[in-house]
């Protein structure tokens, strides 16, 4: 796995939002989707309050940056549900850390 990389992205925030480095250990690659890409922000939000989650507290992964789509084609209501006025895209993915140690399936 020396030359292999692990990357994470979704259609809505493509192509890649997080990625490991080739020099990362096998353990780091196996347990993480890597580090946030340049010019992109990530945060974990408390799903009950909508506020920033406390450190090491699970919540919803949110992404903001040039990679986030402008919206769903012909679906303004769905777009408004996914992307806030502050331009944070709510992925619907449950995560433990903003360093993205692990990402669980959509909630």
Image (cartoon, rainbow, N blue to C red):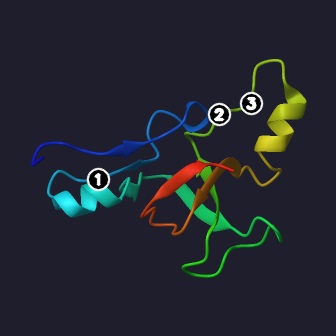
Residue 21: x and y in percent read 23, 53
List the single residue furthest toward the left.
2
Instruction: Please state which of residues 100 and 58 is positioned toward the viewer in this rendering.
Output: 58
Q: What residue appears at the point 82 percent right and 68 percent down from the top-left corner?
A: 48
Crowd tier of the residue under label 1, counting other residues whose Cα lies within 10 Å: few below 14, some 14–19, many 20 or above? many
Crowd tier of the residue under label 3, counting other residues whose Cα lies within 10 Å: few below 14, some 14–19, many 20 or above? some
Q: Which residue is mark 3?
A: 71
Q: Which residue is mark 2?
A: 69
Query: In the displayed structure, would residue 61 be above or below residue 49?
Result: above
Query: In the displayed structure, would residue 58 be above or below residue 66?
Result: below
Q: Secondary structure at mark 2?
A: loop
Q: What residue appears at the point 75 percent right and 26 percent down from the top-left corner?
A: 72
Q: Secondary structure at mark 1?
A: loop
Residue 87: x and y in percent read 73, 49
Residue 26: x and y in percent read 17, 57
Q: Secondary structure at mark 3?
A: loop
Q: Are marks 3 and 2 in contact (CB under 8 Å)?
A: yes
Q: Which residue is mark 1?
A: 20
Mark earlier in primary sequence (3, 1): 1
Disc ID at residue 92: none
């Amino acid at each position: 796995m020396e030359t292999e990389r692990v990357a994470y992205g979704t259609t809505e925030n493509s192509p890649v939002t997080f990625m490991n480095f080739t020099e990362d250990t096998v353990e780091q690659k196996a347990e993480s989707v890597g580090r946030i890409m340049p010019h992109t922000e990530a945060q974990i939000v408390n799903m009950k309050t909508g506020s920033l989650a406390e450190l090491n507290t699970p919540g919803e992964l949110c992404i903001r940056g040039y990679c986030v789509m402008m919206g769903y084609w012909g679906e303004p209501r769905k777009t408004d549900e996914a992307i806030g006025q502050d331009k944070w895209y709510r992925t619907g993915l449950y995560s433990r850390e903003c360093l993205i140690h692990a990402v669980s399936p959509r909630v």
